[in-house]
Amino acid sequence: MELTEFISRLESRILSTDVDYPNVTNLCYEAKEYGIPTVTVFPNMIDMCRETLKDAPVKICALISYPHGGFSPQQKADECANAVLHGASEMEVVGNTRETKSQSRAYLVDEMRLVKETVGRDVAVKFIIEIEMLSDEEAKLACEAAAEAGVDWIVTSTGEYCTLDENRNDKMLVPTVHEVGLIKETVGNRVKVQAEGNIVDVETALALLAAGADRISTPCPVKLIREFMEREENGNV
């Protein structure tokens, strides 16, 4: 894989609210400088990102119904429509985990389809399924619902929840090769796959891409890019 391809498959993001203006503008400046194709932000950050990015070929993705996905389908659709008006060209929507775990496929399809129909063909719609909370069968059900509804991407998780390490300390979630492979095996080429979580090293990113991820969403894309460049210089890519 060439560096340009690696960068083209990255997404930068801000998923926390304890940030100031420079955090938001720096996200956009980094994307412009390194050619990162997409930045994901809260809807109230879209105007600032649009102004900072101006004519740069960087897409703005709006994070919808974060973090628990507990909005009604109509609320999610309305929030997406408003984000489009402000300049977002992608939607990253937290799905309804309760309905997934309850095997409510019809609900999931209807919710996903409503969002997609609301924003239209030209706006990419991504649904987060929080796969770390699901059994393999539940994850497959969510993926099949996404394919049926015609959404564009399945996202592994918000990546903002924690698990426990061997010492029972909080440990940020990282998507696994198994999780990405399960999604890819289920949807094939019908829906794209985004690995999202605490992906903070290039080895993990490359492993997830090899497992079937089309995109890596990371809080530190520049770190990954620099690590990739070091690997290239050492002949390890």
Image (tube, rainbow, N blue to C red):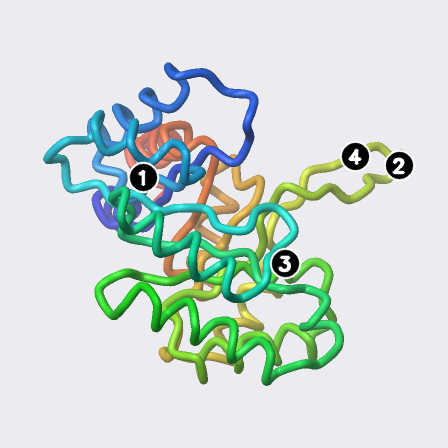
Could you classify mark 2 by the number of other residues whose Cα lies within 10 Å: few (under 14), some (14-19), or many (20 or more)? Answer: few
Of 71 and 197, nearer the camera is 71
Residue position for label 3: 130
Residue position for label 2: 168
Residue position for label 4: 170
The number of callouts visible is 4
Q: Earlier in the sequence, mark 1 or mark 3?
A: 3
Of 105 and 212, nearer the camera is 105
**What's the CA distance linking mark 4 and mark 3?**
18 Å
Residue depicted at 69% across the width and 58% down the height:
132
Quarter-wise, where is residue 235 in the image?
A: top left
Report the amino acid beneath label 2: Arg
Disc number placed over residue 235 in the picture, else none: 1
Tag 1 secondary structure: loop
164, above or below 151, in the image:
above
Report the amino acid beneath label 3: Glu
**What's the CA distance linking mark 4 and mark 1?**
36 Å
Q: Earlier in the sequence, mark 2 or mark 3?
A: 3
Could you classify mark 3 by the number of other residues whose Cα lies within 10 Å: few (under 14), some (14-19), or many (20 or more)? Answer: many
Residue depicted at 39% across the width and 72% down the height:
151
Report the amino acid beneath label 1: Gly
